Image: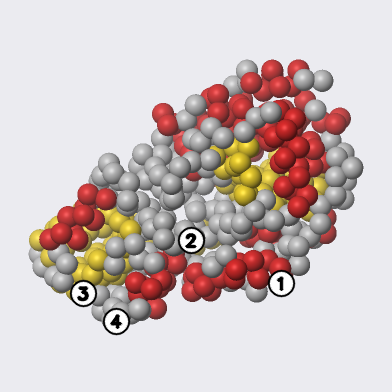
Amino acid sequence: MTDWIGDTFTSDAGWDHLVSLVDVDDRMAGSDGERAGLELTRDALADAGARDARIEEFEIQGWERGDSEIRRGDEVVASGRNACIALPRSPSGEATGEFVDLEYGVPEDFDEDLTGTVVMVSSDTPDSVDRFVHRREKYYHAVEAGAAAFVFANHVEGTLPPTGSVGTADAPIGEIPAVGVSKETGARLARRREGEELTVAVDCETPDATSGNAVAELGPDTDEYLVVSCHVDAHDLAEGAMDNGAGTATLVEVATALAAREDELDTRVRLVGFGAEEVGLVGSSRFAAGVDPDRVKAVVNVDSNVFGRTLRLDHHGFDALAAAGERVRDRFDHPIALGEKLVPHSDHWPFVERGIPGYMVSGETEGRGRGWGHTGADTLDKLEPRNLREQAILLTALVVDLAGDDVSTARRPTDDIAAALEREGKATGMKITGDWPF
């Protein structure tokens, strides 16, 4: 039966949910807005036909933004949301030192003596480096090198300071003040302030807060189950439309389609909208810690799709997941990009690092970095309902395929995961950020 395909391609369930999410003021982890997003998602999953829709709460270290600026003496050289913003989980305070532009800020750039300096790095990674160097890795390289403050400059034009957390699971608040600046501000600082003494000032609050995971169920009540997930929280600068309103809307659309095909599911499906992803994968880490790995058949985690029309499935070298992606691609004769390298970010990772088969589902885009993600430009106007519906159809087919009794998935030994991270050059960064689980 293919009626569900037409129903999904004409459905408004996911897009309407996306609109409701972006209309929330902000969905920062632990905020009233995140709670509103979780409640909207719980209710949307229930309306889709899932059972036992609920929010499973947990406590987190909160973080609330104040004003931030860069000064030269008493002169303010960068401030305001179009120029300079604090990075979440930066500590509150001021630090003064010689300004040093490290350009890309790849690991070898931190070999010089940076004690007491204000370090600036780009959000981009050069093509000469065979892996993407994450913001948090650059931050903790700066900390380890003795820097007094950290400036993260966007490589995307448009007066868009980037955001992103700098804390760790063990130390949620970072060690030195950290700000994001727009590409234009970064270029001006590099041209006019190299070698000058600058002050980075961050004002923020760090109250105790509550987050949660929105959870619901579909299919038979089997011991083994699939996890189909997204994260609901977003940074407080913009609507969080792509990251990750799109993924949450896709979860709702897939749930709607699966509910209509529930009698075709041989395996239980747990639908989860995680909280507090943007501040260290907190919701998914708590959820994954509570599962029996042998009962999780696979994880299908959707994060930052829809903006790119072609669906991307990073399968982390799990052969069964690669094969399922190929079957769906061939069945629909529709482009699907498949990747086998490990992606140690987003909510699939707390499962994959334990050897549980998991996809990172996103949209194929050009270049490195997040583009408009993590900036004030992550807004609804960048997305199209067509892409959401097409991707929901493909992912629904993928979940039904994986749920089949004739499909088995094998775990990977954690030693294999660790070795792959070493081969791919990702272990060094994970160790310096405190994310190495082995």
Residue 367 screen position, x and y as percent: 43, 46
Instruction: Name the one closer to the observer, 235 or 359.
Output: 359
Tell me if residue 154 comes above or below residue 45 in the rendering.
below
In the image, residue 384 lies at what x, y percent? 49, 26
Please give the name of the residue rendered at 76% of the width and 37% of the height, measured from the top-left corner.
327
Question: The residue tagged with tag 1: helix, strand or loop?
Answer: helix
Q: Residue at x 17, y 55 (%)?
A: 188
Q: Nearer the viewer, mark 4 or mark 2?
A: 2
Badge 3 amino acid: Gly
Among the two numbered marks 1 and 2 on one chain, the one whose residue lies closer to the N terminus: 2
- Using the numbered discs, state the Cα–Cα distance from disc 1 to disc 3 in whole angstroms: 43 Å
Per the model, the C-alpha gap separating discs 4 and 1 is 35 Å
Labels 4 and 2: the sequence-earlier one:
4
Residue 97 got which mark? 3
Determine the residue positioned at 66% across, 70% down.
Answer: 419
Mark 2 to mark 3 CA distance (whole Å): 32 Å
Disc on the earlier residue, 4 or 1:
4
Q: Are marks 4 and 3 in contact (CB under 8 Å)?
A: no
Measured Cα–Cα span from mark 4 to mark 3: 13 Å
Q: Nearer the viewer, mark 1 or mark 2?
A: 2
Q: Amino acid at mark 1?
A: Asp
- Quarter of the picture containing the C terminus is bottom right
